[in-house]
Amino acid sequence: MAFLLVLLTAALPVQARNQKTSATTLRKVTDETGRVVQLPAQIGRIVSLAPSLTETVYALGLQDKLVGDTEYCDYPADAARKHKVGGAINPNMEEIAALRPDVVLVVKSLNRLETVRALEQLGIPVYSADPHSVNGVIESMKRLSEILGAGPAGAELEQKLRDRLAAIQAKLKDVPPKRVFFVVWTAPLQSIGKKTFIADLLTYSGATSVVESQQDWPKYSLEEAVRLQPEYLVFASSHSENVRNDVETLAVKPGWSAMEAIQKRKIAVVSDAINRPGPRIVDAVEELARQVHPEVFAEKN
């Protein structure tokens, strides 16, 4: 009961402001999950509960309006200095309410529905993004730019990303895709399903996932992975040397040594941008493409 009272007390500034806001200054928008959200005509205070959305806010030049984000929002570097409201899965409602945000940004695939409902009960508007492909990520950022009042910046960002993507696709036009296994985790072994934006990102990089699962994050036995015999193993990490050291450890473990990609050290390590459906998505596409198709991107004398 005491905790509930604290929550309600923290929420009072938001509720009081909402009561004073006339209907003419509010607008209704539909987020990417189909929810209708009432937002102020002008967004002045933003809280982001997803690293990808924090990056998007910065890419749109709205960082001065970002009053809070999560412990995992670390890019660009300035994002790490923003007020922290906890993690993406378990944010602190008191901290969020105290920041008096005009909107809280979430991603359906990362943040919990319980978080959205709790914020709604406190009178705090929540906008949810839900991209499932590379094109969907770009469209999602453009839509968000318009909602946050940065339409021109969003249009510029969209054009820049689409131009870069087209240039990469032109290079890979006649190149057969590499069969890859994207490693989310090694113990237990976990990969990606066909409907994730990462699987779509692989295709833009001149690769295709050997995993056919309809689950987003399927678990595999090592025997199954070996049977698939991917040409490359793909890892996401900001510390590529650590991953390569881990691969050397895996190479001497029973089972892993039977995988041809391990034997030939066909390992691609991409930055954590590949895990974030945000403005660095084309960086991740190019990073992976350069590693699995080095001959295409080799500098010509």
Image: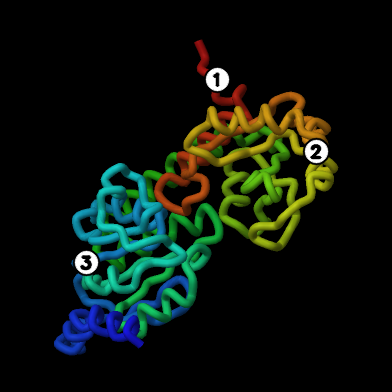
Seen from the viewer's position, the closer of residues 71 and 235 is 71
Q: CA distance from mark 1 to mark 2?
A: 26 Å
> Quick one: label 1 or label 3, which is nearer the N terminus?
3
Q: Which residue is mark 2?
A: 229
Instruction: Name the colour scheme.
Output: rainbow
Check if mark 1's residue and mark 3's residue have beta carbons within 8 Å. no
Q: Nearer the viewer, residue 173 or 99?
A: 99
Residue 45's mark?
3
Q: Secondary structure at mark 3?
A: loop
Q: Is residue 129 visible?
A: no
Query: 65 left or right of 175?
Result: left
Q: Neighbour class for label 1 at 10 Å: few (<14), some, many (≥20)?
A: few
Looking at this view, name the residue that lies furthest to the top: 301
The image quadrant that residue 35 belongs to is bottom left
Q: Is residue 30 left or right of residue 255?
A: left
Q: Residues within 10 Å of mark 3 (few under 14, many from 20)?
A: some
Q: Amino acid at mark 1?
A: Ala
User: Residue at label 1?
Assistant: 298
**The N terminus lies in which quarter of the figure?**
bottom left
> Which mark is first along the chain, 2 or 1?
2
Q: Tell me the SS state at disc 1.
A: loop
Residue at (76% x, 28% y) in the render: 252
Q: Percent position (x, y) of residue 96?
A: 29, 70
Residue at the far front: name it. 2
Picture layout, residue 137 above or below residue 8 = above
